[in-house]
Image: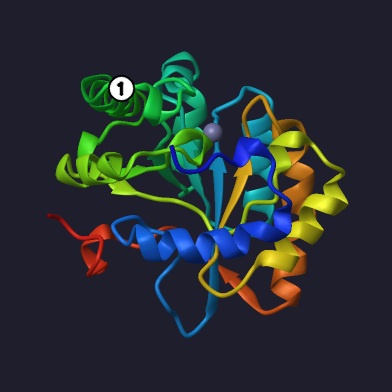
Amino acid sequence: MLFSPQQMLPPALYPLLHRSLKTLFPEALWELPPHPKQQVALTFDDGPHPQHTPALLRVLQEFQVPATFFVLGERVQRWPHLVRQIRQQGHEIGLHGWQHRSFTQLSRSELHSGLRRSQAALVAACGGIPEEYRAVRPPNGLFWPRTLTDLRSWGYLPVMWSVVPEDWLCPPVAVVVERVLNQVRPGSLIVLHDGVQGGSQVAEVVRRLIPALREEGFDFAGLPDPADLPSCGKD
Ligand SMILES: [Zn+2]
């Protein structure tokens, strides 16, 4: 077991940890590739949620900012109209497992079948093909080195993080925004939550965060196409 954000590290430690893990596990995506604009990616885990996700989508639409949602298959099956709405607004969708269980607690076949089932739920909700949903973020940041190899060999792209403001603990909105601004740099993958934990204030966080990041010269992007990533292409 490598790392769990739920161990509540001091937020200032995340950038250090990010640098070490990025070097140790280059088969995962830890940040956006270099770009002339100072791009960052807003990512949201644990949804969809019947109240928090629509509130968040309204803010993203207002600011015309793209984002990536790492959804739980069970919640996709329960609220398919929410993921349709996410897609209709042009955001990307990745996988976060069928339920919110650490991948280290699942057998390889449980993990694989949970991801395939989640893809099927997304296809049922949004149409398209399962391969459109290839980005996978492990719940709680936990994985075995073998997990990354498996994900890659099954055709998935493991996507990690670089900015973690611990919003799931619901600190004041201003604190979440300040933590992001302290950690952010060009290419950052910013992790926020629109699920049960942290989701109640995510719309307000984003409403304050987007103008603050723009003020500092950052632009917003989705995830890169795995085919464009030399170290993250197909095996
Ligand atoms: Zn999660």
What residue is rendered at 41% in x and 17% in y? 77
Residue 65 location, x and y as percent?
59, 58
Q: Is residue 203 above or below residue 215?
A: above
Residue 74 location, x and y as percent?
43, 17
Q: Is residue 155 left or right of residue 30?
A: left
Residue 28 location, x and y as percent?
34, 55
Q: Secondary structure at mark 1?
A: helix
Q: Nearer the viewer, residue 1 or 232?
A: 1
Which part of the image, by quadrant, shows the C terminus?
A: bottom left
> Where is ligand 1, by quadrant?
top right
Furthest residue toward bottom: 36
What residue is rendered at 34% in x and 48% in y? 158
Residue that badge 1 annotates: 114
Across the whole image, how many numbered discs are drawn on residues?
Answer: 1
Instruction: Identify residue type, mark 1.
Output: Gly
Furthest residue toward left: 235
Scheme of image coloration = rainbow
What residue is rendered at 44% in x and 32% in y? 84
What residue is rendered at 55% in x and 39% in y? 4
Report if residue 97 is visible in the image: no
Which part of the image, by quadrant, shows the N terminus?
A: top left
